[in-house]
């Protein structure tokens, strides 16, 4: 998607086995459209060569502050001024300690200290043995660098190069990429709490069958990710889908419409914004058979009775918090025709300020979509785009409409 198009990143490597993952990370940044300047400490060069990093980034690697290639001989100033962000991955325990003390005896620590802190974020991807990670000195230092303005990206858990198992592995390149992309997005939802429903629901007929629909959950997951990128604290209530949870998003899995309603109502009190993207089954079998329904050889199919499912969006929109404006509700409409008229009618019927209409069969399972936003002022078209890009635009449109606090 070229999420980093036009961005220039300094990728700093410090000493650690995870340097091998930094090669992949560099490739991932370049693939997303970023230009990457690699800076390596002496220790990092023990683990991976500058040749590899130069080949992947397409630029000579910087390793020394005494680099005569820079006309003014000030690589720490030049490199930090050119960057849109500095990412240190892997970031060793020793390097974190150095940052805490403002030490600057090698090019990478020097340029971190010299960076224009208001404009150039510093993101750290720690990597170390589990004992080093949990050591009070490391934890103290991490809290201090965060307080000084660095963003600590967290660590993974699992088997470590040393043979031990625990916390301290560097995050995987695709996870770091998602975090770096998120860090570069505007934050119009900072401090807001967002609740999203996504995916289909599954309404059981018996233990082996049920009714569901073609919703893949992609749009809702994209909305959750975009809201998170925009700075919100996000909870995603998901029906049965096969999608990874966006990073930093809390996920609650449910199966049926009634479970989705219960989970959503339990969370709505703590939300400022509710976005209902789920394709909730309108009806469920009135009773779930305890055992598999068998053919009875009569040639007659079983007679199923249906009950209407609760309308989750309408129920939430009727809560006093929503009616008072403290909880802003956004609905989606999956239509097969007459999008504008159906969307306007649905917005009024559900009692919500904003509704995003789309043509259901044209979007289910697809990676892109187009939306028609309908509010009291009228309709706005969001043209066809990948679902994540569309979700980011939608989040910006919602943020503009949220009542100020
Ligand atoms: N919705 C919901 N609970 C339901 C049905 C729908 O929360 N039981 C929400 C959807 O998540 C979506 C919006 O309501 O945000 C509209 O869903 P849609 O299926 O398009 O509309 P319906 O309410 O089912 O109306 P209709 O059958 O007339 O199309």
Image (spheres, rainbow, N blue to C red):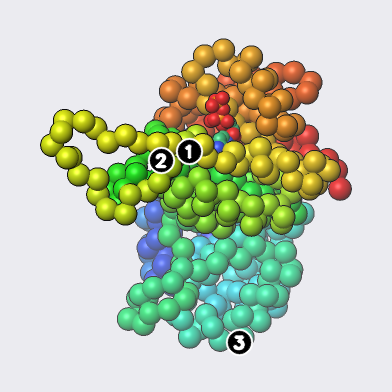
Looking at the image, residue 288 lies above or below residue 393? below
- Which residue is denoted by mark 1 in the rendering? 307
Q: Secondary structure at mark 3?
A: helix
- Which residue is denoted by mark 3 in the rendering? 136
Which residue is at the front of the view, 339 or 395?
339
Mark 3 nearby-residue class (10 Å; few <14, some 14–19, many ≥20): few
Q: Position of residue 196 (x, y in %)?
A: 60, 46
Q: Position of residue 342 (x, y in %)?
A: 61, 18
- Which residue is denoted by mark 2 in the rendering? 285
Q: Quadrant of ligand 1?
A: top right
Which residue is at the front of the view, 298 or 288?
298
Q: Is residue 150 visible?
A: yes
Q: Which image quadrant is residue 24 in?
A: bottom left
Q: Secondary structure at mark 1?
A: strand
Mark 1 nearby-residue class (10 Å; few <14, some 14–19, many ≥20): few
Residue sitting at 43 percent across and 36 percent down?
A: 306
Looking at the image, residue 374 lies above or below residue 90? above
């Amino acid at each position: 998607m070229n999420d980093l198009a036009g961005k220039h990143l300094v990728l700093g490597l410090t000493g650690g086995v995870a340097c091998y993952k930094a090669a992949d990370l560099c490739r991932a940044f370049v693939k997303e459209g970023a230009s990457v300047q690699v800076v390596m400490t002496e220790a990092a060069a023990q683990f991976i060569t500058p040749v590899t990093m130069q080949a992947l980034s397409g630029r000579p690697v910087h390793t020394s502050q005494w680099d005569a290639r820079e006309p003014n001989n000030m690589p720490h100033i030049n490199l930090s001024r050119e960057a849109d962000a500095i990412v240190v991955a892997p970031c060793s325990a020793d390097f974190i300690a150095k940052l805490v003390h403002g030490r600057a005896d090698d090019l990478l620590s020097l340029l971190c200290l010299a960076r224009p802190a208001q404009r150039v974020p510093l993101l750290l991807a720690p990597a170390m043995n589990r004992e080093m990670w949990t050591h009070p000195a490391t934890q103290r230092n991490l809290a201090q660098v965060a307080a000084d303005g660095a963003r600590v990206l967290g660590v993974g858990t699992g088997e470590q190069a040393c043979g031990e198992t625990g916390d301290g592995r560097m995050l995987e390149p695709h996870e770091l990429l998602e975090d770096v992309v998120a860090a570069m997005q505007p934050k119009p939802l900072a401090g807001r709490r967002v609740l999203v429903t996504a995916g289909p629901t599954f309404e059981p007929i018996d233990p082996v069958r049920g009714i569901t629909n073609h919703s893949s959950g992609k749009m809702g997951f994209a909305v959750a990710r975009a809201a998170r990128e925009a700075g919100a604290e996000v909870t995603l209530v998901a029906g049965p889908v096969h999608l990874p949870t966006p990073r930093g998003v809390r996920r609650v899995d449910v199966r049926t419409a009634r479970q989705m309603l219960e989970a959503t109502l339990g969370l709505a009190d703590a939300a400022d914004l509710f976005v209902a993207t789920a394709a909730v089954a309108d009806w469920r079998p009135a009773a779930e058979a305890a055992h598999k329904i068998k053919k009875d050889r009569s040639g007659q199919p079983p007679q199923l009775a249906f009950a209407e499912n609760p309308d989750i969006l309408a129920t939430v929109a009727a809560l006093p918090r929503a009616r008072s404006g403290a909880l802003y509700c956004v609905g989606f409409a999956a239509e097969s025709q007459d999008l504008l008229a159906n969307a306007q009618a649905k917005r009024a019927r559900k009692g919500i300020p904003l509704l995003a209409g789309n043509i259901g069969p044209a979007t289910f399972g697809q990676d892109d979509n187009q939306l028609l936003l309908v509010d009291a002022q009228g309709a706005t078209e969001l043209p066809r785009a990948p679902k994540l890009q569309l979700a980011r635009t939608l989040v910006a449109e919602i943020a503009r409409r949220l009542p100020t606090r």
